[in-house]
Amino acid sequence: MSDEKKLAIIATKGTLDWAYPPFILSSTAAALGYETEIFFTFYGLQLLKKRLDLKVSPLGNPGMPMPMGMDKWFPVLGTAIPGMEFVMTVMMKKKMASKGVASIEDLRELCLEAEVKFVACQMTVDLFDMQPNDFIDNLEFGGAATFFEFAGESDICLYI
Amino acid sequence: MELDNYRPYNRQQVELGGQALVVGYSRNAWSKIHLLEGLHLQMELLYSCLVRKRVVANKQATGMGLCHLLMDNGMTISFRPVVTQHCDVEVYQTGQPLVDLPIAEGKKIRPRWLYVDYRKGQWCGEFGFA
């Protein structure tokens, strides 16, 4: 039996803020010697697109800190104003860059360099009429059964 | 490559730790090329709750990291993955000690590009993997 520990992650979200956890956790675990696999399903497939265009929205996101204490006084309806999503996305990216945080593109490449295995949910690809060439290379397409072969033997399994 | 976003004035392709690395220079850095001799630029990758990157120069560089290279122009570049004991968003300001991360055997984690700049009398830069 291998001594190598295994980490399995299910990534279901496709927004900018939710892209960080699966890539950070898997890149770190892989660097430490974990055998790591991420199963991207539903909106998580957005994280595998060749050209990432991830956004974050303040609408319906009461946990999101906003500048100038806006999360306390800015009306919820205001977060639906056209352009707010774009503004918030730009601000989030600038905040990350100012703290020296690696971009999603960087993190994804780090994962691939560290030999993290990416599995894209075939059902979701079919459901949303996506094409395999929409996605980056080095992917495996499969379903839950494919992923369970690995997840069932993992030491840590996370749902994100 | 994200290096293109910086519009480097000049580029060099080298090999660091067995993998190709593109080194781009700003116009300012290229004009100061005669000052590169003896310079040590270290690409530091901090694994924490948010994976962070920074380029440190000379006195701030610690050891030779995971891999290093002495370039033809006299500059040394190195790559150092590190970790802290506690997650701290102000880790660079608080001066919490950074410890070399023991990268697992066989994991070829290497930057793909390094951008070298010279501003206000200081060497600085960025690096990345994408």
Image (cartoon, coloured by chain):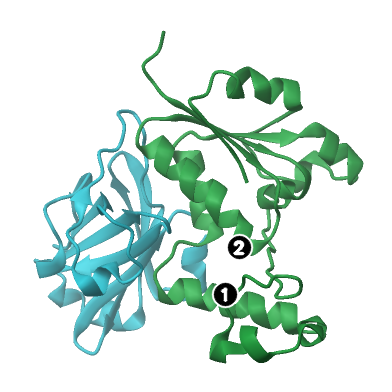
Q: Is residue A45 left or right of residue A160?
A: right
Which chain is disc 2 placed on? A
What SS does tag 1 mark? helix
In the rendering, at what x and y percent does residue A45 appear?
73, 46
- Chain B visual colour: cyan
In the rendering, at what x and y percent does residue A79 appear?
76, 82
A47 vs A145, nearest the viewer: A145
| Residue sitting at x 66%, y 91% | A73
Residue A56 seen anywhere in this rendered image of the structure: yes
A61 vs B42, nearest the viewer: A61
A136 vs B87, nearest the viewer: B87
> For the residue marked with disc 2, what is the amino acid?
Asp
Q: Which mark is residue B61?
A: none
Q: Is residue A64 above or below residue A138?
A: below
- The chain assigned the colour green in the figure is A
Q: Which is more N-terminal, label 2 or label 1?
A: 2
| Residue sitting at x 16%, y 71% | B36
Q: Is residue B36 left or right of residue A68?
A: left
Q: Which mark is residue A17?
A: 2
Q: Which residue, given by chain and number where applicable, does mark 1 sit on?
A: A92
Q: Is residue B114 left or right of residue B37?
A: right
| Residue sitting at x 70%, y 75% | A58
